[in-house]
Image (cartoon, rainbow, N blue to C red):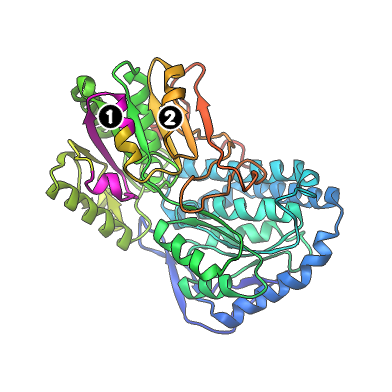
Amino acid sequence: MHQIFIDGAWVQPLEGPTHAVTNPATLEPIDTVADCGPVDVARAVDAAHAAQPGWQNVPAADRAALVREIGGRVHDNGRDLATLLTRETGKPLCESIDCIEAVVALFNACAAGASLSVGSPHRQPGAVVAAIAPFNFPMLFMACAIAPAIAAGDTVVCKPPPENPLSSLMLARACGALPPGVLNVITGGAEAGQALIEHADIGRVAFTGSAAVGRTIAAAAQGKPIDLEPGSVDAFIVCKDADLELAVPGIVWARLLNAGQVCTSGKHIYVERSIAAEFVERIHQCVGFLDVDDPMKPATDLGPLVSLDAARRVEDQVGRSLREGAKLILGGRRFRPSGLPGHFFQPTILSDVRAGSVPTREEILGPVITITPVIDAAEALRLARGSAPGCGASIYTSDPQAAVMAVEPLESGMFRINDPASGNTLGPFGGMRHRGILRELGGADVEVFQRSKYLRVAEAPQRKSWWFPYGARTRWTGCA
């Protein structure tokens, strides 16, 4: 059984059952971890609380040097970290490499900004931060909580997701140069998370995940400051003047990245009716050539979903969408590519999706592309506002200036024009609903009393090197 990390040491849990962490592609066991209870949670929080005053008083330059050293250690162990991340999450190997590179860049950015984090009128150090990460990007989102917190002088207790905690535990090894108690990592599920959030010495909570769990966490926090980023149903809007040569592969990559398990990408497509048939045909051709296989193979584009429950949930959402009138163009079922027994779901395309049906009101965390034809961009914006936006929407048009004016009423923390989410850019992101106040991946928190919108306009739209297919991305970039 894997140990937990408390007060600068690897220790055995004192209570609770255990569960196996398995490879979602092969179902082979990787390791066993504890489902920590209140006793182990209290040990971790007590260590962080005791370490906090001393860590806060460490000169900012010295804190920055240690944060930068963590980034260097992650880089040096990038190959092993990426391999472990793929084995426990099911994301393709090149996507794991991208995650490791983003983690390195994040620690370096926070190190550079460490001296600026002191004295902010809205972000004073001095807290013990509880960090709870989601299953889709466990190590990256854990780093999003750790790096800015320790750079600012806070201490942290982390609870990675129960489905795939091993890469976060390996990240803790890269943080070994920190003083004891500055970083602590426990394992477990909802019970551990509840005990952590409710502990009296927790001063701040950071969570990224589903809206339902986010509401539960907000209630359990009992007034503690929360950096809360729940999922959403953001839109891709495709205008009749869009360049489909670029829009289609960009949307397919952004929607199906990590087998569609991405909270910050658009989830549903509104396309002007005059080009809808051509758009659907191009999407079909693009998705049909994707390679679904063992994520350890260099050419694999899509791996499995994280768990059997996740696959069943997506299957149920597709089934209900069809019963509500959607048209199945491709996929729609679980399957076993190359005979693999894991939690694979066919890349799926649903067209003629009605407004108000499942894909417009529920976040589908799976490889499912859903499309609603609309009269024009104005109708698309109206329908998008009526769904559940919040994290990141996109519009494709040859008139970006008009798009900038049009998106103002849309409640989305990010809006991209002619460009989906980047594969290698550390831009801030965060939602505008459900108390979404954190802007992650930017090296520092924004003013928490503002509702900022991150707007990205592609100056020279072009196909990106990190889009599908992944067959050409076989080298280890950036990682040792």
| Residue 443 can be seen, yes or no | yes
Q: Residues within 10 Å of mark 1 (few under 14, many from 20)?
A: some
Task: Assign a secondary structure to mark 2.
Answer: loop
Residue at left offset 63%, top offset 40% = 442
Q: Nearer the viewer, residue 173 or 384?
A: 384
Find out whether residue 376 is within the magenta segment.
yes
| Quarter of image, res 369 | top left
Q: Which residue is mark 1?
A: 379
Task: Assign a secondary structure to mark 1.
Answer: helix
Q: Position of residue 65 (x, y in %)?
A: 81, 48
Residue 476, placed above or below residue 199:
above
Left or right relative to 422: residue 247: left
Residue 114, placed above or below residue 209:
above
Q: Which mark is residue 124?
A: none
Q: Which residue is mark 2?
A: 407
Q: Amino acid at mark 1?
A: Glu
| Residue 163 can be seen, yes or no | no
Q: Position of residue 230 (x, y in %)?
A: 45, 53
Boundaries of the magenta span? 356-381
Residue at left offset 51%, top offset 82% = 16
Between the residue at mark 2 and the residue at mark 1, the CA separation in whole angstroms equals: 13 Å
Q: Position of residue 473 (x, y in %)?
A: 47, 33
Left or right relative to 143: residue 368: left
Q: Position of residue 29 (x, y in %)?
A: 42, 66
Q: Residues within 10 Å of mark 2 (few under 14, many from 20)?
A: some
Q: Nearer the viewer, residue 128 or 246?
A: 128
Of marks 2 and 1, which one's residue comes earlier in the chain?
A: 1
Q: Nearer the viewer, residue 472 or 218?
A: 218
Q: Amino acid at mark 2?
A: Val
Question: Can you say which quadrant of the picture contains the C terminus?
Answer: top right
Find out whether residue 361 is within the magenta segment.
yes
Left or right relative to 50: residue 410: left
